Image: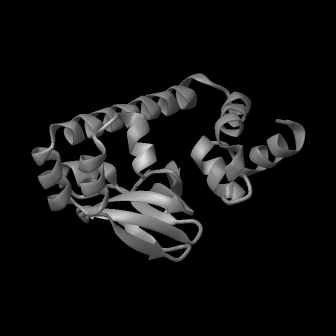
Amino acid sequence: MKNFLSQIFKVDDDILDEYASNWLEYSIPKKTIFSEPEKIEPYLYFVKTGVQKAYFFNEGKEHILFFSYAPSFSGAMDSFLTQTPSRFYVETITDSQLLRLPKRKHEQLIQKYRPLETLFRKATENILIGMIERHNELMAYNVETRFKKFMGRSSHLINSIPQKDIAAYLRIDQTNFSKLMNRIVI
């Protein structure tokens, strides 16, 4: 985790060590919901191993917002940051080893150390940029281009995530997704 955070913004080792020492190990079996709508997210999560998905339902259909996997943050981050009820579920797809940090401790540490505040501002900027790129892909590209872009950045997930979930994430009908898998070589 310290290596991941240092790539976002360099923080003195003593500060980063103190920050990292407050994260607690959290193991979750596959197919376990650990964040859900109408509940306030009390933790920030960091993925050590495993894959998770964030999703909501609309008219009985599952819509996947994002996948999280090592090394990255996970959970209902908007709820964590604003301490308002989440609007979506976060569920493990595979057995997952996470680290988690309570909101109160996170706030205490970023108030104590200005470099941590800068680090998390930059991390939030990176998440926002990724969300804008995802929105752009969904709105501007056809299904084949969305599929190719996903495979270009996340092909390692193809064997970890059910195809129906990847299809839902890309907003591609499952039948068309299967055809793309058989037709396009990446």
Q: How many labels does the image show?
A: 0
> Closest to the observer: 45 or 4?
4
Q: Which of these two is toward me, 96 or 58?
A: 96
Q: Tell me the quarter of the picture where residue 116 sits.
A: top left
Q: In which quarter of the image is the C terminus?
A: top right
Q: In which quarter of the image is residue 42?
A: bottom left
Image coloring type? one colour
Could you say which quadrant of the image residue 180 lies in?
top right
Name the residue furthest top. Answer: 140
Q: Position of residue 97 (x, y in %)?
A: 49, 68
- Is 120 above or below relative to 175? above
Question: x, y (%) of residue 130?
Answer: 46, 33
Question: Seen in the image, is 93 located left or right of residue 127?
Answer: right
Residue 147 x, y percent position in the rendering: 70, 36
109 up-or-down from 137: above or below:
below
Query: Residue sitting at 47 percent across and 58 percent down?
Result: 47
Taking the spot 71% from the left edge, 44% from the top edge, the residue there is: 155
Q: Is residue 52 left or right of residue 37?
A: right
Task: Using the rendered image of the protein, determine whether residue 60 is visible from the camera's viewpoint.
Answer: no
Q: Which residue is drawn at 53% across and 54% down?
A: 70
Whether residue 171 is visible here, answered yes or no, is yes
Residue 63 in percent (x, y) is at 51, 51
